[in-house]
C-alpha cells in the first residue's frame, strides 16, 4: 500500500495543481442565508409508516429535516390536501388499482390509494417535525379534478399555488427541497422551482422515494438535466 506522501510524490506537482482544490479538498459547507428557504415537502402521516401511502423509510427524513432546518431562517412546509373522491385516487376509477395510470385532460396520472384527505389525521404534518420558525404552509392538490405534486404549479401545468410569487416577494433566491416523496412531490417541486428561476438544491438523505415503474431514477435524471443540485444534509453548514 502506498502512503499519502508516496501518492502525492507520484502525482507530482503538475498533477496536484490540476487536481486541487476540487478533488483534494472537501467542498466548503453550504451556508443558508436570508435569501435561502427550506421547502419541507409533505411530511404527513399518510406518507409515514402506517399511513395509506407509506413511503419506505419515510420516518427517517424527520430527524434529518429537523437538524438542517436549524440553519434556515426561512422554512416553508407543504401539505398534500385532497378532497374526498379526488381524481388521483384509484378508488374513484372503476376497475383501476393503485399505481396504475390513466389519461386525464392534463396528461398521464398515476393512481394512488386514498390519501391526505382534507382535515383527516392522515393529512396532518408529522407530530415529530420540530420547526417552530416555519413561516408558511402551502396546501396543494385541493382541486378535485387536478392533482398537484408540485408546490408551485398544479398538474395542469398552469394553475399556480402562489408559492413562486411569495418566495420572490420575500427576496428568496435559493431553495433547498426535502421531504416525501423524492420521485413525486419533491422532484416536481424542484423542477418547477428551476423553471421559476430559483437556484435549487435537493437534500437527498432528507428525502425518500416511492419508486414505482422506474420513477426514482427518472426523477433524478430529470432533476440533473434541469440543473438541480443533489446534495447531502452534511453539505449544509450547521447553525
Ligand atoms: C405524493 C403521490 C401522491 C407525494 C403525493 O407527496 O410525493 N405522491 N400524492
Ligand atoms: Zn397526493
Image (cartoon, rainbow, N blue to C red):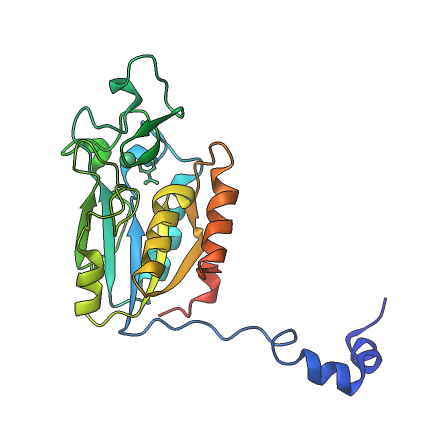
Up/down of 29 relative to 81, above or below: below
- Image quadrant assignment for residue 209: top left
Residue 105: give x, y in percent of width and height: 27, 32
Which residue appears at 25% of the width and 49% of the height? Answer: 153
Q: Nearer the viewer, residue 165 or 33?
A: 165
Image quadrant containing the C terminus: bottom left
Looking at the image, the residue that sits furthest to the front is 105
Relative side of 148 to 227, left or right:
left
Looking at the image, residue 14 sits to the left or right of residue 205; the answer is right
What residue is drawn where x is 37% and y is 54%?
191
Residue 214, position in %: x, y? 51, 36
- x and y percent of residue 236 in the render? 42, 67
Ligand 1 in which quarter: top left
Q: Looking at the image, which residue sits at the far bottom?
A: 13
Which is more toward the observer, 204 or 194? 194
- Is residue 180 rendered to the left or right of residue 220? left
Residue found at the far top of this picture: 95
Quadrant position of residue 113: top left
Q: Is residue 233 above or below residue 45?
A: below
Please identify the quadrant where the N terminus is shown: bottom right
Q: Picture coordinates of residue 95 (x, y %)?
A: 34, 12
Amino acid at each position: 500500500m502506498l502512503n499519502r506522501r508516496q501518492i502525492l510524490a507520484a502525482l507530482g506537482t503538475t498533477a496536484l495543481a490540476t487536481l486541487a482544490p476540487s478533488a483534494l479538498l472537501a467542498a466548503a459547507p453550504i451556508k443558508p442565508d436570508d435569501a435561502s428557504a427550506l421547502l419541507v415537502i409533505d411530511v404527513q402521516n399518510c406518507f409515514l409508516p402506517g399511513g395509506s401511502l407509506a413511503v419506505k423509510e419515510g420516518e427517517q427524513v424527520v430527524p434529518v429535516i429537523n437538524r438542517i432546518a436549524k440553519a434556515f431562517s426561512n422554512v416553508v412546509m407543504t401539505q398534500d390536501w385532497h378532497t374526498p373522491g379526488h381524481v388521483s385516487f384509484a378508488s374513484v376509477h372503476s376497475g383501476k388499482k393503485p399505481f396504475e395510470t390513466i389519461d386525464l385532460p392534463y396528461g398521464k396520472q398515476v393512481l394512488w390509494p386514498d390519501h391526505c384527505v382534507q382535515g383527516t389525521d392522515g393529512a396532518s404534518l408529522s407530530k415529530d417535525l420540530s420547526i417552530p420558525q416555519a413561516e408558511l404552509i402551502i396546501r396543494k392538490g385541493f382541486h378535485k379534478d387536478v392533482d398537484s405534486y408540485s408546490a408551485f404549479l398544479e398538474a395542469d401545468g398552469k394553475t399556480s399555488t402562489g408559492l413562486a410569487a411569495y418566495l420572490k416577494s420575500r427576496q428568496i433566491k435559493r431553495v433547498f427541497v426535502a421531504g416525501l416523496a423524492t420521485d413525486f412531490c419533491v422532484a416536481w417541486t424542484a423542477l418547477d422551482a428551476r423553471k421559476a428561476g430559483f437556484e435549487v438544491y435537493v437534500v437527498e438523505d432528507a428525502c425518500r422515494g416511492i419508486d414505482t415503474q422506474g420513477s426514482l431514477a427518472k426523477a433524478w435524471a430529470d432533476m440533473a438535466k434541469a440543473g438541480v443540485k443533489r446534495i447531502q444534509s452534511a453539505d449544509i453548514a450547521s447553525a
